[in-house]
Image (cartoon, rainbow, N blue to C red):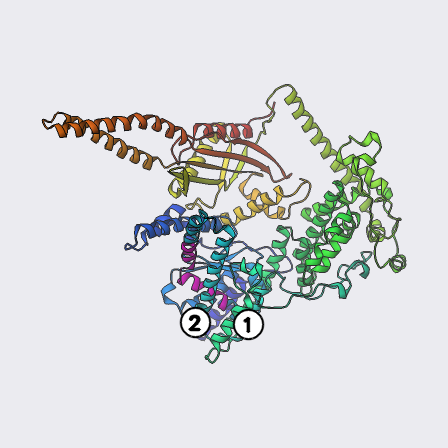
Amino acid sequence: MQNTQFWAFILFLFLGQNSWAQNFDDYRCLRSSGEVPERFSLSSAQKYELGLAQLDEGLSNRDRKTQEKYQQKAIYTIDDLLRSGKVLFGTPLNDYVNRVGNRLLEQTPELKGKVDFFIIRSSAVNAFATATGLVCINMGLLAQLENEAQLAFVLSHELMHVQKQHGLSQYEKDIAILKENRQRSLFKKTDFNSALLESNSYSRELEFEADKGGLEIFLKTPYSVDALESSFRMLNYAYLLYDTSRFDVSYYNEGSCQLDPSLFLAKDSLKHISAWVDDAENTDTLKSTHPSTLRRWEIVKEAIAGKTAGDKLFIEPQADFERMRKTARYELASYYLHNFRFEDALYVVQLLRKEEPNSRYLREVEVQALHAISRFSMYESRSFQSSDYRRQRETYKNIEGGQQQLYFLSSNLRAVELSALALYKAWKLHKDYPEDRYIFDYYRDAIYVLQQHIPNFEQLPKAMQEAEIKAYLAKAPAAQDYSVPKVTKDSLIEVLQDANIEVLFDSYRKEYGYSNLDKGYNLARYILSDLMQDEDFEDYYSRTEDYHEAQEERDSLYDAESERRKAAKEEVDRNLGIDSILYVNPYMLSLKRKRFYLADNHSIDFKNNQKLLDKYYAEVHKNADKLGLSVQTLDTREVETLTAERYADVAILKDWIRLRMNVNDRNHPIFNQREVDEICEKYGSHYVVTGGYMQEGIDGKKRLRRRAITYGVYAGLLFGGIALTNAEDDGLQNTGAFFVIAASTGLFFQLPAHFVNNMRSRGNQIYFSTIFNTQNSTYETLGTNTKPYNGKIGQLSRSIKKQIRKDLKRIKAEDK
């Protein structure tokens, strides 16, 4: 018996450790795993039907219609979130949140089995709940928590939103406000802003109610009320990062990479953290859907006075909480990077590296962020937005917290200095991981960015020794003078005035000394010293130049061929000659339009939405099979084949597409390229196709029903009138004649109206399709179609079928 207990204990320890099996030195961002939750396995149409079935049978027609519209809006919004890939499930963090949430559900048995907890891949410090029982916690909030009791109170608050059906209440209130606003607007007594303020005021009332009800749940648990004030303080400072400690200005210093303290803000110039005040009457607060956090805390403070409560900040093992929070903070580094908040990513990295200084993941994020800043600075230079432009924006002045120093640094350094700093860090990472081709891509591209300022290796500064660098830094002025004269085409010599932007930039660079690092103070003068002593660096410098020249030559030939085709009036879009593609989550939407007088009323047609998706893929596969083109679909709406792995894959691919569309240059490495290549290798294709199809048309059944009623009434009047005209009574004959005339007149006007309505009932549609090559970051628009739509809702029109066939043929066929 004792032996069995021993092995059971060992198994428990193993499983517990395995659930948190994350190596922070070589961290990989969280992916959903395990069994797909039931909320993902039902289609939107099924959820809508279930929602309607649960409506109270005693509702009036008016209230039923309102709730039906709310169901439609809520299900579409929630499903859009669930299918987006931004939701995490099956991770150790989910397990932790579920344990805390389930303990709270013991105090609200009426919600058991009706609530699911999920984590959203977002850096925002927020949580929200829906009337359908979905409670979501953002990763940004988990990263900010100080203890488990804070999480318990936040979840209690959200559970009260579910229990009180606040989502539906807010919707009904908004409908009533807008209706009243329309009536008042006839007399010019109100405007949209007043309606918005009234709506937000009601929303704040609901927040107070959720605080009060959530507190009742919280007080039934062993958790300590000592966590409540810090919970509201955390929400008040949600705009800050999780740590606001002062940035160490020597953090980047190593080897010849030395940043003089004068490059940073002086301590007395740093912006102080704003005080926590009751700003209930502030204009911005009045426009907000949430009340003042200080006011909310004061009300809660009054409510807990004299009440008995628990004394625990942690019920689950504190080590689990700390591991959960640390993981959330590692996630934030990537989230900030992917949302182009590069300075915030750098600040989080330096905080985390205090514990894990050699973490490969953190160092890679750091290089990616520095490189992105230097590249975007290069783009600004190419459009004649010099360092002066970046300095004049002075965005750093509005930043609170330690990351203000990084915002100041990125704004103040010249483009060439930023490129030198990024190159140094990329070089160091490459030297430590020489076999990693993704790290090498950043190293090579960092060289390319520097070459935009210093084209030739011979122009690079000679290596300085440590003593020389110290002497150079000792002469650094306290305030750097980075003034650069404005350059316009008119200021250039005549031969350059019609030149392209790259030529103009070259002239700008040579004229104003970007390649002359001996001119004034410039950290690029010495920061590259370690690289200049690396035997491989010169070779990489010339190879990078050759690589980009060859790429530019290929692009030029491609553009020249396109121009030739245009001039010869040939088909400009060339065939691609691809054998296998991956279709990823095309956007699909079907809208029904109901006409009331002159106004249009749209509603989402859930049933036909799913039917449209099925027909879309059926058309793709049918044509692909004829062409011999291999097509795999990866779609979170295909519930029968959906797994956690496929769900996570969609999230990563969609993120890559978003990043690629927001980067100006295809040579700019994409942040999650490593994960995307792994996915594409798994599915056997590096070509990803996505796009969308939206259609909008008249609700045909209701239109036919109305016409049947209309013609039925006229027919009844007509035949009834004819029968009466044959009566012997003169009065009945006159009545019959009147009926015949009325019916004939009605039919006379109805027939042309019928024709006009047919013309007006033409729907709209839009189709678009794009193919991405994930290996070289190129993409092409395959086709678009915006022709009017005359068919039934949920059907693909002929023109769309033709466009799909044309697009697939172009993918498969070889170019002539």
- Residue at image position (58%, 43%) is 657
Who is closer to the viewer here, 447 or 538? 447
Q: Are marks 2 and 1 in contact (CB under 8 Å)?
A: no
- Label 2 residue SS: helix
Ranked by sequence position, the earlier of labels 2 and 1 is 2
- Residue at image position (58%, 33%) is 781
- Range of magenta residues: 152-173
Q: Quadrant of residue 761?
A: top left
Who is closer to the viewer here, 564 or 404? 404
**Residue designated by label 2:** 216
Is 678 above or below relative to 813? Answer: below
Which amino acid type is marked by label 1?
A: Glu
Instruction: Mark yes or no: residue 428 visible.
Output: no
Q: Which mark is residue 229?
A: 1
Considering every residue shown, the one lying at the far top of the view is: 568
Question: Does the stretch in magenta take in 154?
Answer: yes
Is 114 positioned to the left or the right of 312 in the image? left
Q: Which mark is residue 265?
A: none
Is 812 above or below relative to 16? Answer: above
Is 48 positioned to the left or the right of 468 in the image? left
Question: Does the stretch in magenta take in 779?
Answer: no
Q: Position of residue 324 (x, y in %)?
A: 56, 64
- Residue at image position (63%, 62%) is 240
Is 278 above or below relative to 583? Answer: below
Which amino acid type is marked by label 2?
A: Glu
Identify the main secondary structure in magenta.
helix
Q: Quadrant of the N terminus?
A: bottom left
Who is closer to the viewer here, 322 or 275? 275
Instruction: Mark yes or no: residue 264 visible.
Output: yes
Is 399 above or below relative to 500? Answer: below
Is 309 positioned to the left or the right of 239 in the image? left
Q: Position of residue 182 (x, y in %)?
A: 44, 48
